[in-house]
Amino acid sequence: MQTPTLDHGPILQTAFSFWSSKVLLTAVEFDLFTTLGTRRLTGTELGAELALHPRAISDFFDSLVAMKFLDRDGDGPTSIYFNTPASALFLDRTSPRYIGGMLIMLNDRLFKFWNDLPTALRTGSPQNEVKHGQKGIFEELYSEIPKLEQFMGAMAGLSRINFETLAHKFDFSKYKTLCDIGGATGLLSIEAAKQHPTLKCISFDLPPVAPIASRHIAAAGLADRITTASGDFFKDPLPKADVITMGMILHDWNLEKKMHLIRAAYDALPPGGALIAIEALIDDQRRENLMGLLMSLNMLIEFGDAFDYSGADFRGWCAEVGFTRFEVIHLAGPSSAAIAYK
């Protein structure tokens, strides 16, 4: 019987994947997709606008073509490059669906920190700015408003589709009020209020965030139904509401702090109320949701003892606090909403 031939391709593809990642991240850093916009340019024309060396032009742009992030008509020096529908929608900063802010943060910060993954795995210690004697990410962000706004813009781009999907899939009809914990720009409240005209929302975050959220809420024309509230969710009671949401909040903390937030949510909810946690939930068997598992490793690199979790983990923690009914709703890509009912 002939032994099956094994393919080493997946091993090499994964091993070399940081090459592809760096090409895409650099293209976003250079604003390539925004520079192209709706135009169609030769490599020489586009390279000149991006100040690229002639040697780099064809390899850089054609790599993006091979990765399906650029399209091209023709071959050779006279060929014409243009955005794909996906790059035009998600990587041109003039698009309302722009997610490039997150890619810029990946390139500026996390790419170099992940080089120290071996140290994180052996020590359990953060490998970010703290390792080099600087402020932690949240301390740094909240002390410099421009950086805070940039970070919130990046997170909004990453979360927008999940929040829109939650507003469509979750039955808000039986609830009158929502409070989004760690509400940032107010995006989750905005998407929920858009879809449900009788829902009143509160976007809760630290004091420096309120003016930023208020501007976004006003721009959406929803200042009459969405208010902001300021406080520290580890020191202050959470605002009372029928639904409490936490979008990519719980995974930032260790188990003790996760439990504090879940208890605080339970205390703020009425009987029948719901706590909704939106994350790249790890599947219960920890075999399939690679993004959730990698996100948890990123929490190790960022914070040391913080971690991502499964729907089963969430159910166990919430049951311990007193929640009685649970469900998981898939949102988009690797992300889901874990829901606990009081």
Image (spheres, helix red, strand yellow):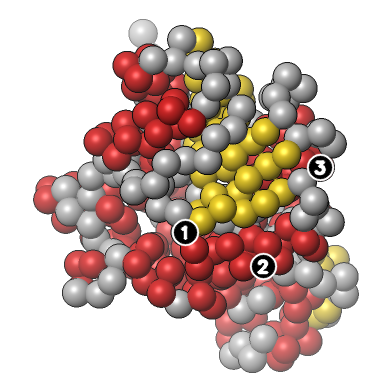
Which of these two is toward me, 6 or 164? 164
Q: Decide if residue 133 is on the left or right side of residue 95.
A: left
Q: Position of residue 53 (x, y in %)?
A: 59, 90
Q: Which amino acid, mark 2?
A: Asp
Q: Position of residue 118 (x, y in %)?
A: 19, 53
Q: Which amino acid, mark 3?
A: Lys
Q: Position of residue 2 (x, y in %)?
A: 38, 14
Dot in front, 2 or 1: 1
Q: Which amino acid, mark 1?
A: Leu
Q: Earlier in the sequence, mark 3 or mark 1?
A: 3
| Residue 155, picture quadrant | bottom right
Q: Earlier in the sequence, mark 3 or mark 2?
A: 2
Q: Residue at x 43, y 28 (%)?
A: 267
Per the image, label 2 sits on a secondary structure element best described as: helix
Per the image, label 1 sits on a secondary structure element best described as: loop
Look at mark 3 in the image and give the residue it sits on: 194
The image quadrant where one finds the N terminus is top left
Q: Whole-Å distance between the Cαs marked 2 and 1?
A: 45 Å
Q: Whole-Å distance between the Cαs marked 3 and 2?
A: 41 Å
Look at mark 1 in the image and give the residue it sits on: 206
Q: Residue at x 83, y 78 (%)?
A: 41
Look at mark 2 in the image and give the residue it sits on: 62
| Residue 33, picture quadrant | bottom right
Residue 58 shows in the view: no
Q: Position of residue 261 (x, y in %)?
A: 38, 36
Q: Residue at x 48, y 31 (%)?
A: 268
Which of these two is toward me, 69 or 60? 69
